[in-house]
Image (cartoon, helix red, strand yellow):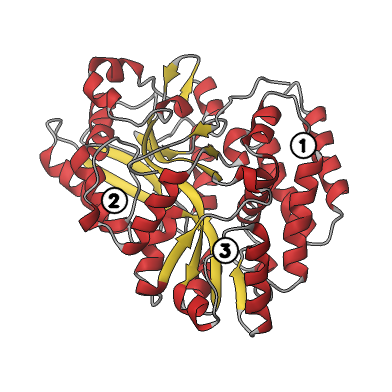
Amino acid sequence: MKKRLLATLLVMVVTATVILTGCGNGGTDSSKSSSDTLTVMCVGTEADTYLGSYKQIAEEFSKENEFGVEVKIDFYENEQYKTKLTTLMASNAVPDVFFTWELSYLQPFVEGGKVADMTPYLEEDTEWRDQFSDGTLELLAYDGKNYGIPTQKSLCVMFYNKKIFADNGLSVPTTYKEFLQVCKTLKENGITPMTMCGTDAWIPAQFVQQIAGGMAGDQLFNDICEGKEQWNNETHVKAAEEVKKMADAGYFQDGYIGMGPEEARDLIMNGTAAMYFMGAWEADNIQNSDLGEDAGAFVLPAYDEQYNNISVGSVDTSFCVSENSKNKDAAVAFIKYWSSLEKEEMLLYDVGRIPADNFELDESKLTPLMTEILNISNSQVGLTPWWDRQFGAGEGVEFNNTCVSILGGEDASTAFDALQQFAEDNANR
C-alpha cells in the first residue's frame, strides 16, 4: 500500500487552533484571467459570516499591492468546490491561487505537477516561515517541500444551548456516561438532543472518528496511517455502533439522514436542538444567530477517560499557487498578505477564524464563545485530521460513506469489512 502521511498533531497548544464549509454562491470560472487579474478560488457561501472579511482582504490587497493586479475571488459550496477544482486541474485551468485541504487531498495535485513549490519563498522570508505554529506547515509538505500555506486551524467541538441546559437542570458533561444521560434527559423532556446532517457524509463520519479516538486514543489513528491496523478494527465498529444507538434512541432530529448541512445547523441556531458537533469554524455563525450569548462549547468526553482531550482537528483555509500561474510572485504576495499578523488578528477577533500563526491574544477582543473554544484548544493533548484529508478520495471518502451506510441500517462489521476490502483491492493504486 502507498505509504501514507502521518499527521497526528500533538498538543496544538495554540494561543489559538480551525474548515470552511457551506453552500456556495456559484461563482464564475476563475480560470480565465488577464495579466492584471489575480484569480482566487475559495470555499465559502453568503451564509458564512466570514465571507465579508475574505472579500475585504482581496479588495485591500488589490488597492495596495505593488504588482498592479486586481484580485478576483470566487466562492463555492464545499462539495461544489471539490468538483470544480478537480475539473480545472484536469484541464490545466487552475486559478492563480486556490483553497486546499491538506495531506492526501492536495498530494495528487502536487504529484501531477499542478502546484507551485512554496519552499523558496518561505526560505527567502524566514520571518514569514517562522510565524506559523509548530506542525502546521508540515501538513502541506511533500518530499520535504512546502506546497501550501495554512492560514487557520480548527478542531471539532460540541456546541450547545446554555439556556436549554439550564432550563433542564443540565450541566456540561465531564464523562461519556454523563453525555449520554444529558441526551436521554433532553429526549425525555421533548427536546432534540443533537442536530446531525446526513447528506454530507464527512459530518457523521467525524462524529464516529471522535468517539473512536475516545476509545483508543490517537494511537489508533497512527497505526492505521502506518498500516499496522486495519480499517475494520474493533474500535471503528464499536464507535459506529455507538452513534447508531444514539440515532435509534432519537438523539438526532427526525429526517437527519436526508438533511443538508445548513438545514441541520439552523436547528441549533434557532433553538430547536440542544447540541451540534461541528468544527470550530462555525463559531461566528452560531454566535451571531438567535442563539447569541446562550451559545457555548465543550469537548466531547472520551468513551475511555484516559483518552480525554484527543479531538478531530487540523489546519484549515490553506492556499496554494498554481504551477501554471503567470502571476506567481503576486500570488505568493497575496497569500503572505492574507496570513499577515494584521489580517489574522482581524479574522480571529471579527469573525472567529483561529489563526495558524503564533501571536499573543487580546482576550478582551474575543467573544465568550471563542474564549471557550480557545480554552478547549489549549487543553488538547492530540489532534487527528479528518480521515478524508489523511487518505483523500480513497479510503478517506469510503470511511465517510461507510459511517453513513451504518446509520442507514447496514451492519457495522459488514460495512467496515467492505472498507477494509476496498483498501486491500486498491493497495497498489
Q: CA distance from mark 1 to mark 3?
A: 30 Å
Residue on which disc 3 sits: 173
Q: Position of residue 152 (x, y in %)?
A: 37, 42
**Image side of residue 343 versus residue 218, left or right:** left
Write down the residue under mark 2. 348
The answer to which of marks 3 and 2 sits earlier in the sequence is 3
Q: Is residue 209 visible?
A: no
Residue toward you, 68 or 221: 221
- The reply to whether the C-beta atoms of the residues labelled 1 and 3 are less than 8 Å apart is no
Q: Nearer the viewer, mark 3 or mark 2?
A: 3
Per the model, the C-alpha gap separating discs 1 and 2 is 37 Å
Residue 359 pos. (x, y %): 25, 38
Kind of residue at badge 2: Leu
Locate residue 294, reporting x and y percent: 40, 74
Q: Amino acid at mark 1?
A: Trp
Q: Quadrant of residue 39?
A: top left
Q: Tell whether 194 sits left or right of 142.
A: right
- Please name which of the two marks, 1 or 3, marks the residue nearer to the observer: 3
360 above or below 362?
above
The kind of secondary structure element at disc 3 is loop
Kindly state the secondary structure of the residue where label 1 is placed.
loop
The residue that mark 1 highlights is 231
Q: Is residue 182 above or below residue 191?
A: above
Give the secondary structure at mark 2.
helix
Marked residue nearer the N-terminal end (1 or 3) = 3
**Which residue is drawn at the image coordinates 64% and 48% (left, top)?**
305
Q: Residue at x 64, y 64 (%)?
A: 178
